[in-house]
Structures are given as structure tokens and as C-alpha cells.
């Protein structure tokens, strides 16, 4: 099982949703960088459960206890070890899953692959693990603090921002519990999530991410293209079903004469259909991409399924679950983006003597 992500700046995570704790080790973090623990707490609060009425009501402080790698407020260059203790797990809510498989969840494939699974809260395949990614991302953000990363909710179900390309006031993102920067659209999204929860159902959505002030030259022209690594990072997040950057699929409807980004004298481009990456290498323009999240697999209504003996049975979700993961996924998307950008920044340093 691969539990690590990154090349030079590398995160390895451990733990299960209902175990004693989750945690991680960050290798390759440069030394001498000031780390503000309050910023890490802020990012963790954006991801943690129980933060609003439209997410799971599991209550976790998500306090990060650092064990190594940070001394007197600065990175030391040694591995950064940390743990996050689990406190509010109610494992009895998952007893009915011991012999049954939730449709479209990892239960079935995990057991077939490994022969034994922790059915409490999804075990290792639970999105609880992503809290560790937010820790690493919060550290990465502080090291590349001149590069700004903003993610926000672009759509929930069939409710979408009409023209999210014009969003510039990113400060409004955190004013909404669904993390959509447009107030009217946000209210409609919240209403849809509440309606789905009342009906025992769930919703998916799309997150848009924009990375500003990226220097020219990050990424490789063949296998380690910057956009392929960003795609890999995003597709590793639980419930993600799609990734597109730049003009994406809409670009297929354009002619080359319209799609080409024409240079200006200052070496920027008039348009940015390339999404800030050309030939796998950043060109200095904003990098932007969309990530599609499926509806949560665990629903609070009866569904047909099978058990471990192959017999047909009925299953219904119990306990506390997100009716929509998108609002809590925003800091995870930003964290993974920050890890990739820092990692490729460090890789780029090895290319120049």
C-alpha cells in the first residue's frame, strides 16, 4: 500500500478514521522557514467536521501535535512528524457494515484486495486521512507564501455559478458555509444540500482552484508534466471523479486560431486557455482547474447490496455523514495544490547549478 505523496517535499500518512489517531511524516521540508501554527489551525478548522449545519456533525478538535522538525517556530530540515488524535468516533454506528458492502464505496474492493478491512468509518479509505494532507499543505503554503492558492465551490448538484471566470474577490469565499463566493448562488446551494439531507440523499459538485504568481519553469516536458501531477494530486482525494485544467473539454469546441494564447510584449498572454501550463511547464500565467466530486456514497435510505457471502441484502447508512463533501474539500484541494507547487519548485532547484 502506497501511503506517500511527493518527490522531494514528501508526505507519508498513517491511521484510520476510528483508530486512536491519524498522522504523518513530512520529508524534504527546507530548513529555516518560519511556521505559524495559527495558520495550520485555521486551515484545519476549514476542513474539520461539525463546522456548520450542512456537514457531518462528528465533533473533532483536529488539534495537530508536532513531534519533530519544528523548533523555536522554524523548520529544522529534519522530518516533521505529527499526530491528530481521534476523539469523537462512534464505531457502533458501523457494526452493520461488518459483513455488508456499501454501493459505490471502497468496502468491497478493499476487502477483496487485502482480505481484511476496518469497517469502522471506512478505515484507511476514509476521508479522515485528508486532515494530514491539510497539515502538510498549510506548511507548504507558508514556504511558498508569494504564490497564492484559492479554491471555491463552483457548483453543487445542478446549481452553478453563472460565470465563475469573473470571480476576483476571493475574500468572500469564507463568508459562505458552502464556500461559494456569490451570495445568491451560495444560498441556493445550501438549500439543495439541506433538501438532499432531509430526503436521506447526497449531492456532488465542482471545485475550482486558481494558483497565482507561479514562476515560469515548473514541471517537465515529458512524464512529470505539472498538470499531470496536479491531476494526480486531485484525483487522489476521496470522491473525486474528474479533473480538467485550462480550457478543458470546452476547448475541444474551439478552433486553434481562437484557442491559441497570443503573447504580449511583457511575455504574458492575452488569453489563458492554456491554464498557465504549456508543454507540461508553467508559463507564469494563472493556473486554474476544475475538480468534480461525486455524491457521497453513504446515504440514509435503503439500498440493495450484497454481503460477504454474496447474498442479497438491504443496507442503510447510520451515524453522521456529510450530505455533500464539497464545502470541506476546499482546503484539501488547496493543500494538495500547495504540496505539488512546492515539490516542483524544489525539483526545479536541482536543475540549475
Image (tube, rainbow, N blue to C red):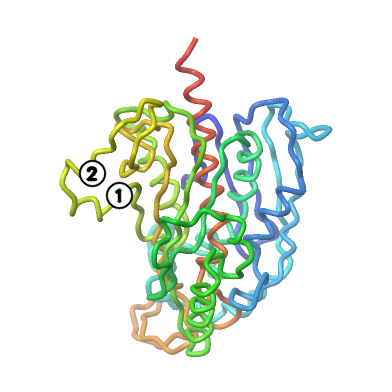
State if disc 2 and disc 1 touch (CB < 8 Å).
yes
Q: With respect to residue 245, does 215 lie above or below?
A: above
* Residue 6 in the figure: left or right of residue 173: left
Total labels: the figure holds 2
Could you say where residue 195 lies in the image, as x and y percent from the top left? 49, 86
Residue at image location 74% in from the left, 66% down from the top: 87
Judged from the image, the secondary structure of the residue bearing numbered disc 2 is helix
Could you say where residue 61 lies in the image, as x and y percent from the top left? 75, 63
Could you say where residue 57 lies in the image, as x and y percent from the top left? 65, 76
Using the image as rendered, state which of residue 93 and residue 62 is in the foreground: 62
Dot label at residue 247: 1
* Residue 62 in the figure: left or right of residue 196: right
Q: Judge the density around disc 1: few (<14), some (14-19), many (≥20) Cα neighbours within 10 Å.
A: some
Judged from the image, the secondary structure of the residue bearing numbered disc 1 is loop
C-alpha gap between disc 1 and disc 2: 8 Å
Picture quadrant where residue 92 is located: bottom right
Mark 2 highlights which residue? 259
Amino acid at each position: 500500500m502506497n501511503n506517500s505523496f511527493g518527490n522531494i517535499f514528501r508526505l507519508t500518512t498513517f491511521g484510520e478514521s476510528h483508530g486512536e489517531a491519524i498522522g504523518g511524516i513530512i520529508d524534504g521540508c527546507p530548513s529555516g522557514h518560519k511556521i505559524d501554527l495559527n495558520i495550520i489551525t485555521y486551515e484545519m478548522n476549514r476542513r474539520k467536521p461539525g463546522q456548520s449545519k450542512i456537514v457531518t456533525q462528528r465533533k473533532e478538535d483536529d488539534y495537530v501535535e508536532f513531534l519533530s522538525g519544528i523548533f523555536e517556530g522554524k523548520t529544522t530540515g529534519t522530518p516533521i512528524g505529527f499526530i491528530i488524535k481521534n476523539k469523537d468516533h462512534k464505531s457502533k454506528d458501523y457494526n452493520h457494515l461488518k459483513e455488508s458492502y456499501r454501493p459505490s464505496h471502497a468496502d468491497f474492493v478493499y476487502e477483496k484486495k487485502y482480505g481484511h478491512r476496518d469497517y469502522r468509518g471506512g478505515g484507511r479509505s476514509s476521508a479522515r486521512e485528508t486532515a494530514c494532507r491539510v497539515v502538510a499543505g498549510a506548511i507548504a503554503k507558508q514556504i511558498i507564501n508569494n504564490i497564492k492558492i484559492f479554491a471555491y465551490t463552483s457548483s453543487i448538484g445542478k446549481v452553478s455559478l453563472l460565470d465563475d471566470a469573473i470571480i476576483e474577490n476571493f475574500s468572500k469565499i469564507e463568508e459562505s458555509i458552502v464556500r461559494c463566493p456569490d451570495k445568491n448562488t451560495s444560498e441556493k446551494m445550501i438549500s439543495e444540500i439541506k433538501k438532499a439531507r432531509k430526503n436521506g440523499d447526497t449531492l456532488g459538485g465542482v471545485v475550482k482552484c486558481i494558483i497565482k504568481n507561479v514562476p515560469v519553469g515548473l514541471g517537465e516536458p515529458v512524464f512529470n508534466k505539472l498538470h499531470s501531477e496536479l491531476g494526480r494530486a486531485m484525483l487522489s482525494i476521496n470522491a473525486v471523479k474528474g479533473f480538467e485544467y485550462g480550457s478543458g473539454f470546452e476547448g475541444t469546441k474551439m478552433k486553434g486560431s481562437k484557442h491559441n494564447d497570443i503573447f504580449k510584449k511583457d511575455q504574458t498572454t492575452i488569453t489563458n486557455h492554456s491554464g498557465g501550463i504549456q508543454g507540461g511547464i508553467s508559463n507564469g500565467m494563472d493556473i486554474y482547474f476544475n475538480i468534480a466530486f461525486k455524491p457521497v456514497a453513504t446515504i440514509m435510505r435503503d439500498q440493495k447490496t450484497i454481503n460477504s457471502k454474496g447474498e442479497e441484502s438491504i443496507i442503510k447508512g447510520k451515524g453522521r455523514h456529510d450530505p455533500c463533501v464539497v464545502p470541506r474539500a476546499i482546503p484539501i484541494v488547496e493543500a494538495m495544490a500547495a504540496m505539488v507547487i512546492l515539490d516542483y519548485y524544489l525539483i526545479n532547484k536541482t536543475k540549475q547549478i
